Amino acid sequence: MHTNWEMLGHQWAVDLLKKHLAHNHLRHAYLFTGPDGIGRRALAIHFAQAINHPERIYDPEDTHSQQIARMQHPDLSIVQRQEGDRDIKIEAVRELQRALSLTPYIANSRIALLLDFEQASESASNALLKTLEEPPGRVVLMITAESTDALLPTIVSRCEVIRLRPLPLGMLADGLEKKLKIPKDQAKLLAHLSNGKPGTAIHLAQNPARLEMRSKALDTLHSLLSSSRTDRFAHANRFYRNKPELVDTLAIWLTYWRDVLQQTTSSQTPLINLDRAEEIARVAQQLDTAAAHQATRQLETMLQDLRTNIEPRLAAEALLLRLPTISP
Amino acid sequence: MDFRTIIHLDLDAFYCAVEELQNSSLHGKPFAVGGRPEGRGVVSSCSYAARRLGIRSAMPMARAVQICPNLIILRGNHREYGQKSRQVMEILRQTTDLVEQISIDEAFLDVSEISGNKVALARSLQSRIKSETNLPCSLGIATNKLVAKIATDVGKSSIQTDTFPNAIQEVPVGQEAAFLAPLPLETLWGIGPKTAETLHRMGMQNIGDLALWPVTDLTKRLGKLGFDLHARANGIDHNPVTTHRDPKSISQEVTFGKDTNHQHILNRTLQHQALQVSTGLKRAGFVGTTVKLKLRWADFTTITRQITLPEPVDNERTILEYAQKLLKQNWNGKTLIRLIGIGVSGLQRPSQQLSLWDKVDYTRMAQLEAALHQVRSRYGQDVIQRGAQSPNQHGLPPDEEELSQ
Amino acid sequence: MKVSVLQENLAHGLGIVSRAVAPRTTLPVLANVLVATDEGRLRLSATNLEIGITCWIGAKISDEGSTTVPARTFADLVGTLPDGQVDMDLVVQTQTLHVRSGTSNTDIKCIDAQEFPPMPVPDLRDGVVFNVSDLREMIKQVVFAASSDEARPVLTGVLLTVEDNLVTMAAADGFRLSVRKAELSQGSAQSMKAIIPARALNELARIAGDGDDTVTMSLPPGRGQVIFRTDDVELTSQLIEGSFPDFEQIIPVMHNTRTVVSSAAFLKACKQAEIFARDGSHIARLNITPGDELQPGSVEISAQSEETGSSEAVVEATIEGQPVLIAFNVRYLREVLDVVGTPNVALETTAAAAPGLIRPMGDDGFLHVIMPMHLGG
């Protein structure tokens, strides 16, 4: 039962953690790395559930497990950046240290989940180092981060590092279809859209609004490509006002242009926007690699610029006016 | 006019010069002060006649003897050197307060506020030292320490003689970069063989090349050092002449480019000086009980005022607070100020809470203490001092590592 | 659940348990007080997962049941109710607690009692029985010496050991150590050893009632918890994991100077010195001079500050041994003299840089070690 702890992919990681459990060789600290949406937190939580199950197995029906799944368990401490803060504060790590110094309340072990620890302040990182150097008795630390490069090397060297990578698209599609009962075509599309990241795929599957927004954004882009300068200008004037939405849209457009660019170079890389394969092929036919490359670059630059607070309106205008023109 | 005048003074072949004073027959002969050639002795100082033959200081004495088999080797009389050096420094301090002694035979003087021709001033210093101590010296004059020091070296090497160079070299205002340009890169502070090698590989031959190299690129390659080197190559150096002339006080003072009564400027200066003095105290591991403020008005009248504190301090905030208090008490807010400085004296080692968990053998300590007490009560207080209490050592207690590990 | 209680009992009970409420945590239920019928009484419990406090109050129970009530809202409400009877009635389906008193009618949204972390059920048969006032005295004499630095967690606790009928409490930070031993009237069958968070003991001293009541302490095996129980209040605390450093080895075994002074006079002098020492480094210098045939020995206690000035006080003393000049953090001196219960106190010193030992005269159960300050100069 639950040989894969209900994870999509990452079987090797699950097997490794199971082995640690079975041989009673739990490390004091685990570091789960990989891009956002890859499943770092899910794996850490499932691992925590197994650790604190009386029989040390993964069983989602167990009371402890359910509390851990809701991140509301007396022996689970969570450290993450608080909304409105720039980074993870040292106070949070201090509070954690206090909790970890005590005997577990009801479970086998106290578990600390430190999420996106690349966001920790320098002092918070150094404070954590102290705990890693002299870990308290029945404590398991689980850290998630984008990559090991973003952490102090002294932290990384004291953790068992579990590097999670995107899944092959076929495997992810298969998993989505079989485990989440998602129709085959939809599963395949989600695998492509998420670029092999199970967390992202599941998130999309559970948020149809998100998919709808993507469709709309791509429709708009496609129609803008054959619109007049005046129309583009008018659109830019509506478009720049909502910055979060603007950033979202640009990110979606960027996936589209990467697809177009790859088509123009006849690359074998799988399409992200699989459902628009024909449309992308038509656009690619009318453009050369240089034009597709330029559009891609522009989007990347603008996304970057938006982070540094440039004037969004001017940028949006410039972007839309410079997008290539195709016949409908 | 907003530039300083710094004189660098170097006593020519100092040890040898002193030796010649003792023994005039050495004059003009190749001789060296240093260790024995049979051992691993090195040349501490050598006469100009020896230099002409290729002998250099820091060279193994055995090698020096190979170069010049009839080299006269002297063991050196360091007590005498020290005494002569103090005599020279005293003459310098009679010229200005702003003397920074950097070694037994070298010093910087900030003579910005001494009016008149600076070359003439250097000349008069040189002749005064000659007449009062009979020692030769060379001087460099420039707008900063870096260029002044290099000026001295350039001045000396431009005079080829078997006896002392007695050089005086001035680098006029604005000519710093041009003066440095043809010199080899290693002349600059901060360029060792390794950095020089890097710069050579980048295609630079001399300081002029470095000065013209894009600073952004230097910074990218060498970090802060790159930035600093670029400034130095252009003859820029803002380091003040620092005058902690004795361990009894640590101080900082500055002469303004233009006399000022601007509250903001004075405050900023005091803040900066308080920080520097505080850093100096901490670095040296001292705290002090007296804060001094020195003021020189536009008419050169100088006053020094001080406050003695009940508890010794080393922190910037307290030093600044008292310096500001002294300024307020002693300045009407209008009179133009030429120089301002902060000092802390009454130096002592700071108090420190001892730690419970240090592995110290208190039983032994107690026995020792009891034994000391017996000896003292029998023979008087000053018979025995423990190592840690001897005046030249700093008996700081064991640190508190134990707990923080 | 349907119960009736007296307003003053309810207010008292909530006041006691409220100190263990954790208003801001990831577990919302920890901001609530568990309210449950329990063998004819009403049980109020709160826990922050470190310390849990339970208080039982008298109640007229019509229907058994339990729920958890938001602590802040509940306490604020009860505070406004008139003296007299408060009726409470839980609608299980919606977890709504209906509270009625006099003319006031309120509904409070509650969280199911199932969500509340389980509180341990103590087995009091193996417990150790203390007299409340003795226990409180013991706590008072050691707990202030515990560290507040989380970097070394074991020192934020108090080491408690029970061996036969001897109980020992010890606490230390980096600079001082307090050790209190006491004999139990009833011996304990089992040996016990635990590091109890200092906060838990502080709370215990606050809520443990007074006079001749007794407190039973038990350490359920394997639970990592300690439980203190009186008739109507129970405090549980998680223990601190780790081993307490061997404090016996830092207690000085000999001295060169033994100074006996009046505790009150010494305390007064230290308080005076602290006024001047607190701005700076907290240093008080003790110049200890033995007497001779003509005059008694004396301790001169001095302190100075940049801003405030300086102070000197001389306390008469009986001094054996050699004179010594030693400096202490005056707060440490004051804190220990505050808890010395005897009229006279002895200060034993060996050297200016070696630990000082303070013992109440005539009370062998208590001792305190303070590291001196190293004087600059």
Image (tube, grey):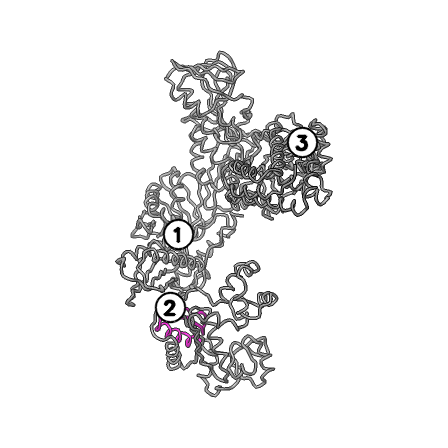
Label 2: which residue? Answer: B98
| Callout 1–callout 2 Cβ contact below 8 Å | no
Q: Is residue A1 left or right of residue C220?
A: right
Amino acid, disc 3: Arg
Q: Which residue is mark 1?
A: C326
Mark 1 residue crowding within 10 angstroms, few (<14) / some (14–19) / many (20+): many
Q: Amino acid at mark 2?
A: Leu
Q: Quadrant of the C terminus of chain C?
A: bottom left
For the residues tagged 2 and 3, is the chain the same?
Answer: no
Residue C164 vertical placement versus B184 (above, below): above
Residue C81 highlighted magenta (yes or no)? no
Name of the residue lying farthest toward the left: B332
Rendered location of residue A133, percent (x, y): 58, 45
Q: Amino acid at mark 1?
A: Ile
Label 1 resides on the chain identified as C
What span is in magenta?
B81-109
Q: Is residue B97 magenta?
A: yes
Say yes or no: labels 1 and 2 on the same chain.
no
Most foreground residue, A175 or A47: A175
Residue sitting at the far bottom: B25
Residue at left 65%, top 46%? A291
Q: What kind of element bears circle 3?
A: loop
Identify the residue under disc 3. A56
Label 2's element? Answer: loop
Q: Which element carries disc 1, helix, strand or loop? A: strand
Front label number (1 vs 3): 3
Residue at 43% from the left image edge and 68% from the top image edge: B144
CA distance for labels 1 and 3: 58 Å
Is A229 or B162 nearer to us in this picture? A229
**x, y (%) of residue C319?**
36, 49
The chain identifier of the residue carrying mark 3 reads A
* Residue C311 visible in image: no
